[in-house]
Amino acid sequence: MTDPQMILGQARYGPVPPDWRVFTKRRGKLSGFLHGTSHDPDPLLVITPEGSVEYASEHKPPVIVAFYDLAGIDLQVSGQSFSDSSTVNIAVWIDLHYHDGRKAKWRSASFADNMRAVQGFIEAWGAYRALRGG
């Protein structure tokens, strides 16, 4: 995978290749102040044909998923409702299965409720597997 810092910098400041998916949002002033991140750059998730890189804050290292490390992925969905409400809260994440047998859960720190981000990850993984004969 290309250098993650280069990917984040290019997504933040310059034109990106057409096959990248870039997700960003403004960091709220109050939220940034309360979490000590008010001077950090805005959150950024970049999905490339080779994987994903997510920057959430200066307090955490970027989260990197390199598709070449993965043996497979599984979409997971969980719903929760309360007896006194007609509302259902849905959580979506992706289970990552690595070639070395490790498993991990991928859920964007800043874009967990953005289904387009999850869809973009799945589409990029599918394209990666198709191009590499997997």
Image (spheres, grey):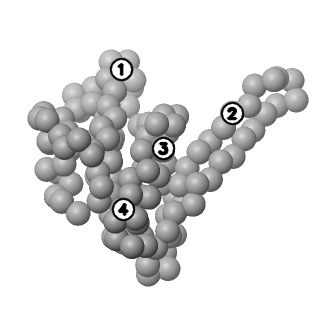
Query: In this view of the protein, can residue 33 be seen by the observer?
Result: no
Q: Nearer the viewer, mark 3 or mark 2?
A: 3
> Local crowd at mark 1 within 10 Å, few (<14), some, or many (≥20)?
few
Residue on which disc 2 sits: 89
Residue at the spot of label 4: 128
The three-letter amino acid code for the residue at tag 3 is Gln
Q: Quadrant of residue 88?
A: top right
Q: Which is more foreground, mark 2 or mark 1?
A: 2
State the residue position of label 1.
Answer: 28
Badge 2 or badge 4: first in the primary sequence: 2
Q: Determine the CA span between mark 2 and mark 4.
A: 31 Å
The kind of residue on which mark 1 rests is Gly
Name the front one of labels 3 and 1: 3
Residue drawn at 51 percent across, 63 percent down: 73
Is residue 16 shown left or right of residue 31?
left
- Label at residue 20: none
Q: Are marks 3 and 2 in contact (CB under 8 Å)?
A: no
Lower sequence index among marks 1 and 4: 1
Q: CA distance from mark 1 to mark 4?
A: 35 Å
User: Farthest residue in the bottom direction?
Assistant: 100
